[in-house]
Image (spheres, grey):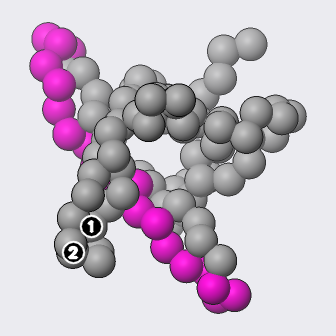
């Protein structure tokens, strides 16, 4: 089974994954980002353009829920609009490094 709409946290600190819909199917990669700006993302997200150029699509932010717990939120430009999503446990998988991309508006 080929997975879609996921982020994998790799051992080297990078991320890899895929975001897909009927309009797009994009393999993504990411790298940690450090900033003194409290509103900055914790990862920058990249993909390859059709000619193979590396382009930045967006990022992943660490946020706090109503109970003060941490969660991760993704925002990327898909070329067909903006995708906002939270990251959560991938259904049917027991790999803790694998997260589902759960879209929201």
The residue carrying pointer 1 sits among few (fewer than 14), some (14 to 19) or many (20 or more) residues within 10 Å by Cα, namely some
Q: Quadrant of residue 14?
A: top left
Residue to which mark 2 is pinned = 37
Q: Residue at x 49, y 61 (%)?
A: 73
As drawn, 35 above or below 25? below
Taking the image as shown, residue 95 lies to the left or right of residue 25, namely right
Q: CA distance from mark 2 to mark 1?
A: 5 Å
Q: Position of residue 28 (x, y in %)?
A: 38, 29
Relative side of 15 to 87, left or right:
left
The residue wearing badge 1 is 40
Nearer to the camera, 51 or 93:
93
User: Start and end of the magenta stretch?
Assistant: 50-68
Q: Label 2: few (<14), some or many (≥20) within 10 Å?
A: few
Quick check: marks 2 and 1 in contact, CB under 8 Å?
yes
- Give the mark count: 2
Residue 47's spot in the image, x, y percent?
A: 28, 28
Residue 5 showing in the rendered view = no
């Amino acid at each position: 089974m080929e997975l879609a709409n996921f982020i994998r946290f790799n051992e080297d600190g990078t991320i890899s994954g895929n975001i897909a819909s009927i309009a797009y199917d994009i393999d993504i990669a990411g790298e940690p980002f450090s900033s003194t700006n409290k509103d900055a993302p914790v990862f920058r997200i990249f993909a390859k353009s059709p000619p193979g150029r590396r382009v930045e699509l967006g990022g992943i932010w660490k946020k706090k829920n109503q109970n003060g717990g941490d969660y991760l939120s993704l925002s990327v430009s898909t070329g067909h609009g903006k995708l906002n999503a939270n990251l959560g446990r991938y259904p049917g998988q027991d790999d803790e490094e694998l997260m589902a991309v759960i879209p929201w508006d």
